[in-house]
Amino acid sequence: MKKILFIPALVLAALMAGTSCNQSASTTDNGNDTIAATPLNGDSALTRASAFYAGVSRDGITINDSDATGWDKYAAQVKEQRTPCFNTCHIMDSLVQADCKDFRDSVDFVFYPFSGADILFPTIIYPDADTYFMCGLEKTGTPITEVKTNYAFYEAYRGAMTNFFKYGYFITKEMHTDLHNAQIDGVCPVMTMLMATQGYEVISINYCNIDDNGNVVHTDQSSNVLEIKFFKTGSTHEQTLIYYSGDVQDKSFNPGLKKYLDNSLSQHTVGTYLKAASFLMHWDSFSTMRNLALDHSLAIIQDDTGIPYRFLSEKFDVTLYGAYMHPSKEFSTKCYQPDLAQLYAAKDGSVKPLPFRLGYTYSRSQWQIARHKK
């Protein structure tokens, strides 16, 4: 097995220890401090390794002719695999540009519960946000810092993305193996791979903890909070991804996380995004997360697996898209929304067409763009 190591272990440790998360929730994602005067510089090792496994580029990586041929084949396979998903992203971007121009540019904090490793779609919808908060049960994982020209690694990385590129979401039960194996041990490698496909460079990756007061604090050991600083190549805009790994049911909700979110969401212009969210916020056991979105969002973009329409319509003006389908048999019949079905059945011209498919339904999809009532 051949490998190319970019950062010696001691250097990596120094990198992780030397760049800490901001120490308070009020400054962790302060949009006033994210614009640099000159183009930013990324961590070349992290960026190159992510681009390599994303099948985007092997620039700056020295491998022999045989390994180069193997990578070229892998890159072609991955490109073919992701093309339909990226076509959806292009169509989605056009729709959001046309229909969300009244709030898109003002959103500086993206709230994306139950996201898994999906940093792709929130950056398509809100490309200029300062901070993206994401969460899921999947572990944070280890940054990609070396390249191995090994078939097992290629298959692991390609396999981890198969369902996402095919359906537009990660399947929870399959992530137990796709993101927990000898090659990939969490969401971090997948996130930076997705960033690489969109021309983003990684500045730093840090493990953090959230203390009881809601402060995000750096730690030099693996933890359940991940901070990734990144930017678009050539840009002066530094952006931050915060990923929280843990159970966010009401009974398990971390008090420090609640304080962090209360502080952060109240200080920013928030856009919530919900997709393939397993209908979790339909249940009272997830009311804390649901209420955070309802109480703090300027806009909520979601499918029917997010916040039930009966809650959403109380505070938001909702524009409907696509077609409403009965939830699949994998989910409780209690997730069916008669009020939403009635609106779609009215056929009064208020429902707009949805020019892409995304989410659990394999034929027609449903989307909602909700603006907070003035």
Image (cartoon, rainbow, N blue to C red):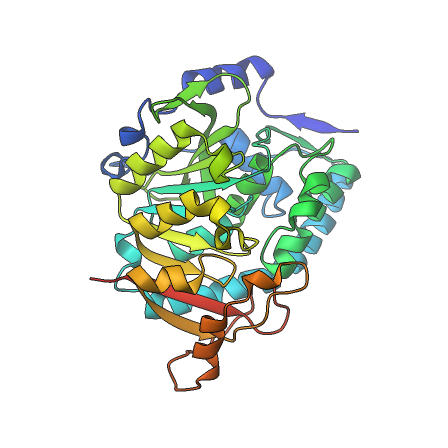
Q: 69 or 148, which lies in front?
A: 148
Closest to the observer, 178 or 367: 367
Q: Quadrant of residue 314?
A: bottom left
Does the image show residue 47?
yes
Question: Going 67% across and 58% down the picture, which residue do you hit?
Answer: 81
Answer with left or right where residue 346 lies relative to residue 316. right
Q: Is residue 333 left or right of residue 251?
A: right
Viewer can see residue 199:
no
Identity of the residue drawn at 51% across and 56% down: 275
Residue 184 spot, x, y in % from top left? 67, 34
Closer to the camera, 128 or 106? Answer: 106
Q: How many marks?
A: 0
- Locate residue 211: give its quadrant: top left
In the rendered image, residue 276, in percent from the top left (x then y), is placed at 55, 56
Residue 18 locus on image (x, y percent): 42, 16
Residue in the image at 59% along x and 17% along y: 8
335 versus 9 height, above or below: below
Name the foreground residue: 72 vs 353: 353
The image shows residue 152 at horizontal and vertical percentages of: 78, 38
Looking at the image, is 25 positioned above or below residue 335? above
Looking at the rendering, in which quadrant would you find the C terminus? bottom left
Q: In this view, does 284 lie above or below 35?
A: below
Q: Residue furthest left?
A: 374
